[in-house]
Amino acid sequence: MYRFQFFRDYMVVLFCNNLKNLQRSLVKLFFLPTSVALIHFSALNGLASVNTPLEITLAQFKQVPCLTEERYSYYKGIIYSLSYPKMRALRAFCSLPDLKAAEAIDVLEKLVFFPLSFDQARFLEMFLSLSDVTIDDGWKFLELTSTLEFTAIQAMGEFGQSDNLTPEDVYSMLNSITLLEDSGRWAVKA
């Protein structure tokens, strides 16, 4: 037992020891049952099987026609290193109906080094969902949007909701938006 010269020192040591015991007790009483309950609840509701963006991207890449298991295993590591916007872009390209394995691999290799923002990936998804869009159209779209300022990208709005829009219409809109000042771009968005 320690020798205490002052009553105050004794109280500080006693309080600190009790505080450590209190912390341990709270962890045992609160966190352990809560985590067990959350795991049990998520397993009951099927939430334990929720797919992550990485898993979704890997699954979509694996479904590309003519992609062998060997090639998939090799490029799987590259997909792991992609940022979220690049994963979205890869999924958008992989959703093209006539995409082959060699083209998907080419897209993946280009995306690794391509600077891509979240908004670009979002608009690329809408663009590639238009009818009669090719891989080359997708890359042209990415090249055009890579130089756009933030307000110009925001002014693009939800162009994917327009009916009968062609890639040329989108390119024309992009060229028109670049000619506007910031205030005009915000007006277009509104």
Image (cartoon, rainbow, N blue to C red):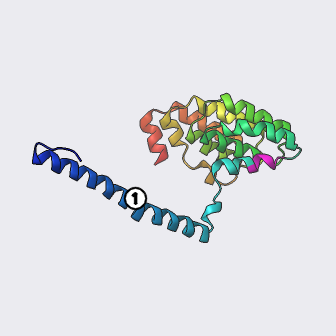
Q: Nearer the viewer, residue 48 or 75?
A: 48
Mark 1 lies on residue: 27
Which of the two residues, 2 or 174, is positioned nearer the viewer here? 2
Q: Position of residue 162 (x, y in %)?
A: 63, 53
Q: Is residue 155 magenta?
A: no
Q: Which residues are magenta?
A: 59-64
SS of the residue under disc 1? helix
Q: Residue at x 47, y 39 (%)?
A: 185
Q: Residue at x 46, y 66 (%)?
A: 33
Q: Quadrant of residue 26?
A: bottom left
Task: Indicate yes or no whether the magenta region holds residue 60.
Answer: yes
Against 125, residue 178 (above or below) is above
The number of discs equals 1
67 left or right, relative to 131:
right
Q: Position of residue 2 (x, y in %)?
A: 21, 45
- Left or right: residue 165 versus residue 96 is left
Kindly identify the amino acid type of the residue bearing the numbered disc 1: Val
